């Protein structure tokens, strides 16, 4: 990560290598550069086949990147890693056929990039292209409070992308949905540096034309792979998709 390089607002994150921040491991890649991936497992293939065809490439590339990240961090063959949905749609890890509730994973993808994050506490990662600023402003009444809309402004595409990515990453870490009441319960207090309510640790980066947000949330009182709070899974944002 190169502070102050490549973008006036946020530090640049280099696609390809695994980065570390706040106890989390993070990787972002340009989607055309994702070569020689580990294969999907039979369970992952069944999840893929249930998705609309238009989502197959992005979903596959995001999961394969996550498998590569987990393999690197946990020193296991990526082919032994599965990233499968809980009942609420959020991803969880299975390694060597066994659930790994002590590790949390998050995935995001846009038309040009995929990202994955791994942490020992609830984590959310999200990508949002600056070209999606207009779409963010159209959804602002639902996602952003009046004070947050003032903070973002109307003429800074990178600020709009950052606000959306932070909200999306936060609700992913909470295993809730951007299209319910959850994003309005998480207040965006600042962008430079990024700050959210709720004892969340947050960071923003920039790569190419895309803003990347990482949110680490406090561990819940109890957390299992079988899920809690059966809410709808996160939906597709304007140009950054997950979970």
Image (cartoon, rainbow, N blue to C red):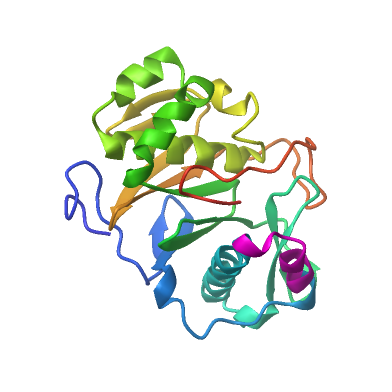
Between 186 and 220, which is closer to the camera in this rendering?
186
55 in the magenta segment: no
- Res 20 → quadrant: bottom left
The residue shown at (60%, 46%) is 122
Q: 205 or 225, which lies in front?
A: 205
Residue, x 75% and y 68% (percent of image)?
Answer: 49
* Vertical comparison of 100 with 133: above or below: below
Would you say the magenta stretch is mainly helix, strand or loop? Answer: helix
The residue at the point 47 percent across, 60 percent down is 115
**Direction from residue 241 to residue 235 in the image, left or right:** right
Quick one: 194 or 241, which is closer to the camera?
241
Q: Position of residue 74 (x, y in %)?
A: 58, 72
The x and y percentages for residue 217 are 55, 39
Which quadrant is the N terminus positioned in? bottom left
Is residue 163 visible to us here? no
129 up-or-down from 63: above or below: above
Q: Measuring from the top left, give residue 124's x and y in whole percent.
A: 54, 47
Q: Which of 221 and 171 is in front in this view?
A: 171
Q: How many labels does the image show?
A: 0
Would you identify the image quadrant in which residue 41 lies? bottom right
Quarter residue 29 falls in: bottom left
Horizontal placement of 219 versus 84: left or right?
A: left
> Is 197 rendered above or below residue 96?
above
Question: Is residue 25 visible in the rendered structure shown here?
Answer: yes
First to last magenta residue range: 44-54
Estimate the x, y position of residue 146 in percent, counting from the top left: 41, 13
């Amino acid at each position: 990560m190169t502070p102050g390089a490549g973008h006036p607002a946020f530090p640049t994150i280099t696609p390809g290598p695994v980065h570390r921040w706040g106890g989390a491991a993070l990787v972002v890649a340009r989607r055309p550069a994702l070569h020689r991936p580990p294969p999907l497992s039979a369970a992952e293939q069944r999840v893929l086949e249930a998705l609309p065809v238009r989502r197959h490439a992005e979903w596959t590339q995001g999961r394969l990147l996550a498998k590569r990240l987990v393999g690197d961090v946990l020193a296991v063959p990526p082919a032994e890693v599965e990233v499968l949905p809980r009942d609420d749609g959020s991803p969880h890890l299975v390694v060597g056929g066994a659930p790994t509730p002590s590790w949390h994973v998050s995935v995001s993808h846009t038309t040009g990039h995929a990202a994955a994050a791994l942490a020992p506490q609830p984590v959310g990662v999200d990508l949002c292209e600056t070209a999606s600023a207009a779409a963010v402003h159209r959804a602002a009444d639902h996602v952003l409070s009046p004070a947050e809309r003032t903070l973002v402004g109307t003429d800074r595409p990178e600020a709009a992308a950052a606000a959306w990515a932070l909200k999306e990453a936060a609700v992913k870490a909470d295993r809730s949905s951007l299209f319910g009441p959850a994003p309005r319960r998480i207040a965006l207090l600042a962008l430079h540096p990024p700050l959210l309510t709720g004892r969340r640790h947050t960071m923003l980066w920039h790569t190419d034309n895309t803003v990347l947000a990482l949110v680490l949330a406090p561990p819940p009182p109890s957390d299992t792979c079988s899920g809690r709070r059966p809410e709808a899974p996160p939906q597709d944002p304007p140009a950054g998709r997950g979970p």
